[in-house]
Amino acid sequence: MLRYLEALNAHDADAVADCVSVDFVNEHTTALGRGVVGRSGYRRRLDAFFAEFADLHYEVEELLVDGDRAALAYRLSFRLVSAGRVPVRVRGVFRFRVDADGRVAHRVDYWDSAEVHRQLNAADPDHPDRAARTG
C-alpha cells in the first residue's frame, strides 16, 4: 500500500498501475468519484487524473494492516486545474485488499465531496455562497 501511495505522490501512472492487480477494483463512495474495474482501464484514466489534480499528494495519517486487508487514513492535497488551480485539502480513508502477489486487488475510497465543494466555492469570488458569507 505504501508503494502504491508513493507512486501516486510521484504522479507516475505506470508505477501506480503496476501496484494493482489485473482485475483491480477501484471503488469510490463519494458522488464525485468514479470507479473502474481492471488495471488497463485504471491505467487509461491515470494521465487525465494527474493532469486535473495538479500537485496531488497523499499524506499518511494512520495505517492499519490485518492479513491481506488494510485501512489507510490520509490527508490529500491538490490543486484542481479545472477550477483555476484552486488548492484543496481533504481527509479520507482507503480500504485495501491485497492479492497474493502484494498488489492492490480492491480499493475503496472514502472522502467528503461536500468539503471539496466548500473549499472550491470559498475560493470562487463569484459563487453565491461566498457572497452571502462576505456580504
Image (spheres, grey):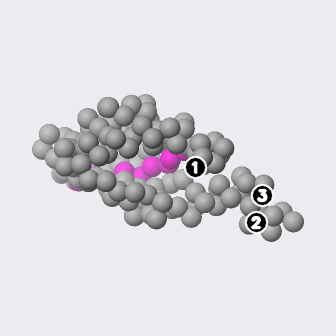
Determine whether the residue tagged by mark 1 lies in a helix, strand or loop.
strand
Q: Height in image: 86 above or below 92? A: above
The residue where tag 3 is placed is 126
Q: Residues within 10 Å of mark 1 (few under 14, many from 20)?
A: some
Sequence-earlier tag: 1 or 3? 1
58 and 64: which is toward the camera:
58
95 and 133: which is toward the camera:
133
Residue 108 left/right relative to 77? left
The residue where tag 2 is placed is 128
Quarter holding the N terminus is top left
Mark 3 is on which residue type?
A: Asp
Mark 2 is on which residue type?
A: Pro
- Residue at mark 2 to residue at mark 3: CA–CA distance: 6 Å
The residue where tag 1 is placed is 89
What segment is highlighted magenta in the picture? 69-77
Residue 92 left/right relative to 127? left
Determine whether the residue tagged by mark 3 lies in a helix, strand or loop.
loop
Mark nearest the camera among 2 and 1 is: 2
